[in-house]
Image (tube, rainbow, N blue to C red):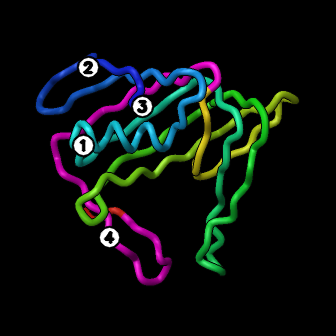
Amino acid sequence: PLPRHTVVQDQGGAQTYLLVFDKGQEVMGGLLAFAKEERLTGGSLSAIGAVSDAALAFFDRKTREYKRNPIPGQAEVGALTGNIALVDGEPFLHLHAVLGLPDGSARAGHLLEAHVWPTLEVVLTAWSKRVQRSRDEETGLELLDL
């Protein structure tokens, strides 16, 4: 299901949404479903809250692959930031997260997945300009085209 949401500002062709994820919702899937539902073609977001059973990743430039780093259990979202652009005409999320652990340490990386517990509060600004990504042959990554 989509996160609960409302438009909090509509100015100059850009809309800013407040999205609220409830217990158990999956973050990446919910954001992607929202982006598709609203037909977003570019934007930025930030969020705070808490999650459980997250997975972050670190890009290994030698292997050109992401190394998955699971974060079992509960974590505070100290920072979640990123953007939305199009890849082959479909919304694509590029998000980084800093997750605080119970002992006060933190883990960071590309957000692959996380389940909300008890809430995640997202501020998303949808841009009026269409933003594209295309594959960079050297890295194998989808990088922004400007």
Which secondary structure lies at badge 1?
A: loop
Residue 59 drawn above or below residue 61: above
Q: Amino acid at mark 3?
A: Pro
Mark 2 neighbour class, 10 Å CA radius: few under 14, some 14 to 19, many 20 or more: few
Separation (CA) of disc 1 from disc 2 = 14 Å
Label 4 belongs to which residue? 134
Which label is found at residue 40?
A: 1
Instruction: Please tell me in which quadrant of the rendered image residue 60 appears.
Output: bottom right
Label 3 belongs to which residue? 1
Give the mark, 2 or 4, whose residue is nearer the N terminus: 2
Given residues 121 and 44, the one toward you in this image is 121
**Which residue reaches farthest front?**
1
* 4 vs 3, front mark: 3
Magenta highlight range? 117-143
Q: Which residue appears at 23% of the width and 19% of the height?
A: 9
Separation (CA) of disc 1 from disc 3 = 17 Å
Which label is found at residue 103?
A: none
Q: Amino acid at mark 1?
A: Leu
Give the mark, 2 or 3, whose residue is nearer the N terminus: 3
Q: Position of residue 101 (x, y in %)?
A: 79, 32
